[in-house]
Image: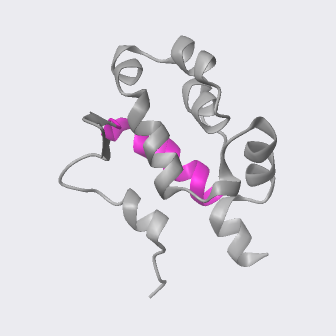
Amino acid sequence: MAKIGPVAASLLPQKKPYTCRGKYIPERMMPGIKRYIEHGVIPGDFLQAIICNNLKEAFWAADDENFENIAAYVGYFYNEVPANAWGSYDEMIKWSDAGGSLGKETA
């Protein structure tokens, strides 16, 4: 049986969504985050803005629920995601080109 790393384990169904400072990441958003982290699949505009650390674009691309919970995304990426997987557009592209965390394991 394959070992599950801490990032992947944090993406498994939980009783409560990831929270930070009273804000949360909606469960419907976790599959896109998981695909990006594990396989490097670049998500939609809102998550791209979060991954690229572009607050202005995140605000514009967010729906109402995500707009209210942007702090949880920042907390999640800061605390749970490898630092080289996010923070700028270049980091996002490098992570994607490498195939995410699973691509890095097989390289």
Is residue 32 located in the magenta-colored stretch of the structure?
yes
Whether residue 51 is situated above or below residue 16 in the rendered picture: above
Q: Which quarter of the picture shows residue 83?
A: bottom right
The residue at the point 33 percent across, 20 percent down is 65
Range covered by the magenta-colored residues: 25-40
Whether residue 13 is situated above or below residue 64 in the rendered picture: below
- Residue 40 visible in image: no
Can you give x and y, in whole percent of width and height, for residue 37 in the image?
58, 54
Can you give x and y, in whole percent of width and height, for residue 95 in the image?
74, 53
Q: Main secondary structure of the magenta part?
A: helix
Is residue 47 located in the magenta-colored stretch of the structure?
no
Picture quarter with the C terminus: bottom right
Picture quarter with the N terminus: bottom left
Q: Which quarter of the picture shows residue 60?
A: top right
78 horizontally vs 29: left or right: right
Give the residue at the far bottom of this rendering. Answer: 1
The residue at the point 68 percent across, 42 percent down is 87
Give the residue at the far left of this rendering. Answer: 15
The residue at the point 77 percent across, 36 percent down is 89
36 horizontally vs 17: left or right: right
What coloring was used for the rendering? Answer: one colour
Can you give x and y, in whole percent of width and height, for residue 103 in the image?
71, 67
Q: Which quarter of the picture shows residue 63?
A: top left
Can you give x and y, in whole percent of width and height, for residue 68 in the image?
35, 20
Whether residue 82 is situated above or below residue 64 in the rendered picture: below
- Residue 28 visible in image: yes
Query: How many numbered marks are there?
Result: 0
The residue at the point 73 percent across, 44 percent down is 92
Q: Nearer the viewer, residue 98 or 53?
A: 53
